[in-house]
Amino acid sequence: MTSAPRSPAAARGLGLLGAVAVGVVLAVQSRLNGALGARLGDGLGAALISFGTGLVVLLAAAAFLPVARRGLRRVGAALRDGGMRWWQCLGGVAGGFLVFGQGLSAAALGVALFTVAVVAGQVGSGLVVDRLGLGPAGPQRVTAPRVAGAALAVVAVLVAVWDELTGAGVSWLLAVPALAGIGVAWQQAVNGRVKQTAGSPASAALINFAVGAVALLIAWLVEVAVRGLPAGLPGEPWLYLGGVLGIFVIGGAAALVHRTGVLVLSMGMVAGQLFGALLLDFLVPAPGTEVAPTTVFGVLLTFLAVAVASVPGRS
């Protein structure tokens, strides 16, 4: 006896729950990568280690997963016959640029303002990317609830980081995280296309990590030429788990985007990331960390924003 097929609304709801879960994993990954970068004194080097670790794990897994190898062959065939464009395989570059942007502007802008600019670029770009149909879900109409939800998401993040925004200055550097956020939305769309062609999230994640690792390696070599090599590697094994968690983030997003569209996926991940960060602040607080009431309210507001954006509406 076969189970009844899920309705589109149910499938979309499950996709949204998955996006929130991916966001929680992303919060843990960000904490680990941040700790590794602090120990190294080199955020770009930490990102390269994270991408490199994830790439090595995926390459080892591909050796034992026939579905992953078949997926890579399908992507190669699609590139040769024109079923896919070469630029659709460059999603990892956007991830690398986000990390580069963190190193370039996060210290000057402050983490809070950097985060707001990334989210603004991400949800704004998500509306456009969905409308153009760049993701595997196809064209998504621009409706009043989607626009309202995107705007509310930016307000929610502003509220969540309000205490950290005190005294933050505005400069041209805001363009860097905004562009990085735009790139993240595009990355989710093209990685979803790669997964759709490959039939395997592992194949999409492998291509993403390979491209991102190459981009980060080039940037890191330039940094080493200017600044020299960083300090020695820390000995705690748990600091190197960020790349493994990144596999679930990239693979999960690629697998879910066809259910949710880019905008709702992005907003669900933002909500999950803020919720995960809040849990970490409660359970494993960093020295000097104190959870403000505005942070809790902002996290709740992000979930309301996701609910608003998910409501069907007229274009």
Image (cartoon, rainbow, N blue to C red):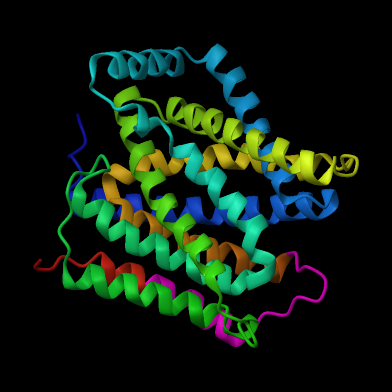
In the picture, measured across the screen, residue 297 lies left or right of residue 187, that is: right
Q: How many marks?
A: 0
Residue positioned most to the left:
314
For image coordinates 87% across by 39% down, the residue present is 233
In the picture, measured across the screen, residue 23 lies left or right of residue 132, that is: right
Q: Is residue 295 magenta?
A: yes
In the picture, measured across the screen, residue 307 lies left or right of residue 28, that is: left
Residue positioned most to the front:
226
Q: Nearer the viewer, residue 274 or 126?
A: 126
Residue 267 appears in the picture as rendered: no
Q: Image height check: is 202 above or below 169?
A: above
Q: Report which quarter residue 3 is drawn in.
A: top left
Q: Where residue 202 sits in the image (x, y, percent)?
A: 47, 27
For image coordinates 25% across by 43% down, the residue present is 134
Q: Report which quarter residue 27 is drawn in.
A: bottom right
Q: Image height check: is 120 above or below 202?
A: below
Which residues are the magenta region?
284-304
Position of the N terminus, as image quadrant, is top left
For image coordinates 82% across by 46% down, the residue present is 227
Q: Image height check: is 22 above or below 116?
A: above
For image coordinates 55% across by 13% down, the residue present is 64
In the picture, measured across the screen, residue 77 lies left or right of residue 169, that is: left
Q: Is residue 13 magenta?
A: no
Q: Where residue 146 sits in the image (x, y, percent)?
A: 24, 67
Position of the C terminus, as image quadrant, is bottom left
Q: Where residue 41 sits in the image (x, y, percent)?
A: 82, 52
Residue 246 appears in the picture as rendered: yes
